[in-house]
Image: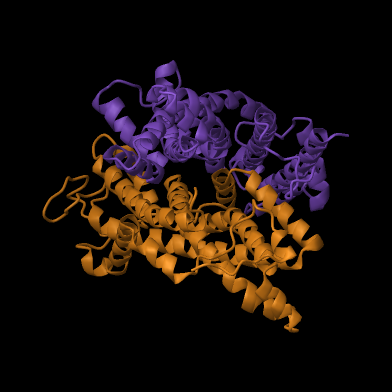
Chain colours: A orange, B purple
């Protein structure tokens, strides 16, 4: 299905290097992406972890914080399928409950990052002028510092706590979204249907919310999916450094940290949580790679 | 003034604005910190809760009672002269501690980029040349896994395998080159995954070009075409990207250095965070931010110089700017 060729002078003003105009919402192509085996596998993996997270209380054989002092650092057994940790807690149950933390923190952080990024990008792109300049300089600065380094410093300064870890990631991560949204808004507002809405006398707010933004949101959702794996790794990394959840919370990164002293005596304490993180990130990356092709078929 | 110089000047101006922004963020960090710095310093010195008067005295001495802009201005004035204040933890100048540790981090980063390049380029080329073969699929799955595995977990797997299991390499510390191998591999492999994808994409594009077809028609051996012709052209974006990856690498390095006890800047930063050593954290952000923007600037300029096809001096419609 071809697009009506947009040959208005204003359309040609959009530099060729800018983002492709959003055509992501096309159901046809989305369906094509979903037919790919790799994307389906990714969706399946993410759904699998989501089911584990929701059903954790039903599936877990033990309470994640229940200690069995007589059976510490044990290998797999019938009673403890993946073994126990240094406090005699069931590793499998902790992993199952841990999926709740990983999925909910990344979902919440992504929602906050998207909200701020979309709001700032839309304001900058639609209003232009001094406000645009000012907001984009802030974005430049945030993008100039390696994000994990800055998140580490901010989380470290705020002090330990999962709320602080998420705040740090939101403070650092929204900038790239704002830049993408601004680019999209600039591209979309030059298109004919937006021009037409303006010419018909629609108020600016109406044009932005009803005509521009519906074309901006889908690519941003794609971007969020692509970046989700990276964000999970960042959250797990900061938790691993002990900046996030407090004991005895069963978060995968924190569990890796707890297992460090027992690397030699009970390596399973480190192997399984790392495997869980990797599988979840692989799932998100499979979906993200498929969606990225949608945005940029060449890359 | 001609275009390249104007471009250089504009980029330099932009760099200064961004650097000022970084310095502002670094300084603002101390205001995010819970608690009063003066109280914390005294608590650390004496080990007991300080009196109200003592805190007030020190606040005045350190100039903490001045308004925020004045404190920022003074901090910045010192920072540009290379004075980032004294560490709460050790009492030593932060700038000196950072500079002393920088060499180790640089060593690790270069070794990691080296690992990443020697893994990614041959595999990426193989993957492109044997496109859609089982080998290609296998390599792409490998790249996906490499990009998804947390660096700190990979570090421990490497320690388990090569240090504990096989006893080939030391697990931690800094000594000879053997200490560098495991951290560099842990850091480089994640990077290699994305670099391999780029090599593959870049090679596929070059292999479609006319000059490759010409070379084939002339009857040149396939190996020669791939290595001498296509790869040479495909390398440009790869080298640029690998230098731009430095930022991500530096972020990951903080965690990998902590795992391996590698005495670099990243480990210093994590230790400073554990010790709530705010001047050191501030200094770390400013120092690494500065390194990063300068590297990006240099890469940018080098790229413009190296590749005449990069037409930064043209505006979108081909007119000379």
Q: Is B240 positioned to the left or the right of A55 in the image? A: right
Q: Quadrant of the C terminus of chain B?
A: top right
Residue at x-position 76% and y-position 35%: B79
Residue at x-position 32% and y-position 60%: A40
Q: Is A199 positioned to the left or the right of A215 in the image? A: right
Residue at x-position 24% and y-position 27%: B165
Which residue sits furthest right?
B1
Which corner quadrant of the image does residue A257 belong to? Answer: top left
Return the x and y of residue B58 as percentages of the image width and height. Answer: 75, 43
Residue at x-position 61% and y-position 24%: B100
Return the x and y of residue B171 as percentages of the image width and height. Answer: 36, 26
Q: B189 or B195: which is nearer to us?
A: B195
Q: Is A26 positioned to the left or the right of A180 in the image? A: left
Q: Can you see residue B184?
A: no
Return the x and y of residue B50 as percentages of the image width and height. Answer: 66, 47
Name above or below for residue A177 compared with residue A154.
below
Name above or below for residue B315 compared with residue A37.
above
């Amino acid at each position: 299905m071809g697009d009506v060729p947009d040959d208005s002078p204003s359309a040609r003003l959009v530099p060729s290097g800018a983002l492709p105009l959003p055509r992501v919402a096309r159901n046809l192509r989305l369906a094509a992406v979903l037919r790919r085996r790799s994307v389906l596998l990714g969706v399946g993996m993410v759904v699998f972890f989501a089911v584990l997270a929701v059903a954790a209380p039903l599936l877990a054989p033990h309470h994640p914080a229940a200690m069995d002092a007589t059976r510490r650092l044990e290998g797999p057994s019938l009673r403890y399928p993946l073994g126990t940790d240094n406090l005699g807690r069931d590793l499998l149950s902790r992993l199952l409950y841990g999926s709740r933390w990983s999925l909910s923190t990344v979902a919440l952080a992504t929602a906050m990052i998207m909200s701020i990024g979309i709001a700032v990008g839309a304001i900058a792109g639609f209003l232009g002028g001094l406000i645009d300049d000012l907001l984009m300089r802030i974005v430049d600065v945030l993008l100039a510092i390696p994000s994990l380094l800055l998140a580490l410093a901010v989380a470290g300064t705020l002090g330990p706590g999962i709320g602080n870890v998420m705040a740090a990631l939101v403070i650092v991560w929204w900038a790239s979204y704002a830049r993408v949204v601004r680019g999209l808004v600039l591209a979309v507002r030059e298109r004919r249907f937006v021009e037409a809405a303006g010419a018909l006398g629609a108020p600016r707010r109406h044009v932005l919310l009803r005509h521009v933004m519906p074309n901006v949101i889908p690519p941003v959702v794609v971007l969020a999916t692509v970046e989700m794996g990276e964000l999970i790794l960042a959250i797990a990394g900061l938790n691993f450094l002990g900046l996030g959840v407090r004991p005895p919370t069963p978060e995968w990164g924190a569990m890796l940290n707890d297992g460090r002293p027992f690397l030699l005596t009970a390596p399973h304490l480190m192997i399984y949580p790392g495997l869980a993180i990797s599988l979840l990130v692989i799932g998100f990356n499979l979906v993200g790679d498929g969606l990225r092709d949608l945005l940029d078929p060449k890359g | 003034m001609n275009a390249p110089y104007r471009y250089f000047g504009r980029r330099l101006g932009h760099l200064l604005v961004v650097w000022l922004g970084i310095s502002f963020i670094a300084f603002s960090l101390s205001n995010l910190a819970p608690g009063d710095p003066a109280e914390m310093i005294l608590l650390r010195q004496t080990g007991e809760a300080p009196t109200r008067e003592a805190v007030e005295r020190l606040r005045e001495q350190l100039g903490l009672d001045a308004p925020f802009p004045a404190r920022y201005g003074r901090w910045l004035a010192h920072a540009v002269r290379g004075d980032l204040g004294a560490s709460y933890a050790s009492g030593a100048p932060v700038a000196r501690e950072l500079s002393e540790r920088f060499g180790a981090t640089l060593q690790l980063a270069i070794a990691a980029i080296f690992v990443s390049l020697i893994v990614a380029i041959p595999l990426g080329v193989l993957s492109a040349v044997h496109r859609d073969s089982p080998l290609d699929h296998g390599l792409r799955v490998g790249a996906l896994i490499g990009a998804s595995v947390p660096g700190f977990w990979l570090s421990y797997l490497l320690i388990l395998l090569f240090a504990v299991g096989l006893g080939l390499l030391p697990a931690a510390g800094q000594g000879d080159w053997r200490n560098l191998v495991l951290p560099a591999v842990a850091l480089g492999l994640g990077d290699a995954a994305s670099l391999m994808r780029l090599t593959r994409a870049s090679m596929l594009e070059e292999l479609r070009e006319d000059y490759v077809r010409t070379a084939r028609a002339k009857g040149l051996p396939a190996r020669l075409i791939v290595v001498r012709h296509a790869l040479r052209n495909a390398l440009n974006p790869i080298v640029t990207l690998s230098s731009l990856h430095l930022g991500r690498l530096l972020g990951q390095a903080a965690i990998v250095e902590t795992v391996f006890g590698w005495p670099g800047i990243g480990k210093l930063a994590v230790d400073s965070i554990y010790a709530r050593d705010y001047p050191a954290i501030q200094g770390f952000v400013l120092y690494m931010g500065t390194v990063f923007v300068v590297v990006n600037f240099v890469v940018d300029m080098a790229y413009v110089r190296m590749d005449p096809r990069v037409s930064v001096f043209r505006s979108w419609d081909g007119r000379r700017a």
